[in-house]
Amino acid sequence: MPPAIQTRGLRKTYRVFQKSPGFGGAVRGLFHRRYQEVTAVDGVDLEIEPGELVGFLGPNGAGKTTTLKMLSGLLQPTDGTATVLGHLPWKREESFRKKISLLLGQKNQLLWDLPARESFALNRAIYRIDPTQAAATIDHLSALLEVRHLLNQPVRELSLGERMKMELIAALLHKPQVLFLDEPTLGLDVVSQHRVRDFLRHLVAEEKITTILTSHYLQDIESLCRRVIIIDHGRVIHDGSWDQIVRNFSDRKEIVLRFSGTPPDLQGADWGEIIAKDAATLRLRVSPAQATAVSRRAIDLPGLEDIRIEAMPIEDVIRRVFSEKRN
């Protein structure tokens, strides 16, 4: 079976006007304009199989959204090529548009002053969806997202989390085979983030939708994606499993010891590094190889009530990936 998404040397550059400072610079710019070429995506090669849910990570300006816009046909690349479900995306064929959906977390597709149900009716007409099928899809998705009771409420009266759930329904109404999600949990509270993640996990497992997910919340990626692609300055710097990232770039663990009284004064390299200490708790930083031995030795410490081993924080792991790949 061919890949659902494939790119070869995908590149996008922009010609950006360079304004000189001050009033004089503004006047000169009227007659002699200077431009700089900015590369947003620089030779990206990808292959994503049907039904995969892939995390797409990178700092602001790395090229994530530009890549998604090219794959969805909103932008045409400067160089390279791509196919999505066998289509050249920027040709924007009707048969292609019916198979994909792009959800930008910072952009609204719902009509602000009307109930979400009215926007769904508009989408149903645009995609020529059978009314009975559309009604069944809306009922099913709104039940999963727990927003069925809000379908007739104006969108402007909904909370941010409720609006995002409605945006998801609108994006999925025509049952796309490929879904591009750009920051779908941006700005949501913890509870809403959790519910959206549960929904996406269920959806991909049930419908086998090929999905690319970008997010600044690493919990989204960790909980949903087995494969992670990391992009920086327009180039892919890592493509592999999430477990592989943790194995390769997580070089420490933290052991948290809680005591009934004042923690003992632990000395020596055999205990690792003490990174925090308070009235009853001690936090040690150790290498993965040390973790088991230190934990066994800690069990015999007087007054020990609890011991917990924590992995290296995810944010620190990703920072290490960027740091090492740039050097």
Image (cartoon, rainbow, N blue to C red):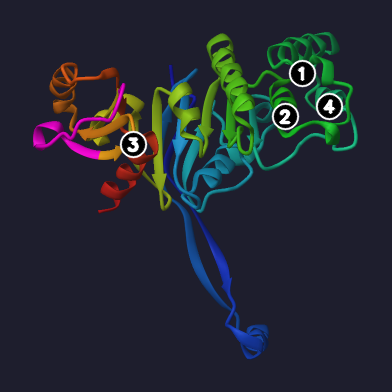
Secondary structure found at label 2: helix
In the picture, the disc for residue 167 is: 2
Q: Is residue 132 left or right of residue 220?
A: right
Q: Earlier in the sequence, mark 1 or mark 2?
A: 1
Task: Say which label, 2 or 4, has the lower sequence index.
Answer: 4
Q: Residue furthest front?
A: 261
Does residue 18 lie above or below 186 as drawn?
Answer: below
Q: Is residue 98 magenta?
A: no
Amino acid type shown at disc 2: Glu
Amino acid type assigned to the residue bearing label 1 in the image: Val
> Would you say residue 270 sits in the magenta stretch?
yes
Q: Which residue is mark 3?
A: 278
Mark 3 and mark 4: Cα distance apart in space: 51 Å
Which of label 1 and label 2 is nearer to you? 1
Q: Which mark is residue 73?
A: none
Q: What is the secondary structure assignment of the residue under circle 1?
A: loop
The answer to whether one can see residue 296 in this image is yes
Determine the residue positioned at 67% across, 33% down. Answer: 93
The spot of residue 84 in percent (x, y) is: 53, 30
Magenta-tinted stretch: 259-274
Mark 1 sits on what residue? 147
Q: Which residue is mark 4?
A: 116
Residue drawn where x is 63% and y is 83% of the image: 29
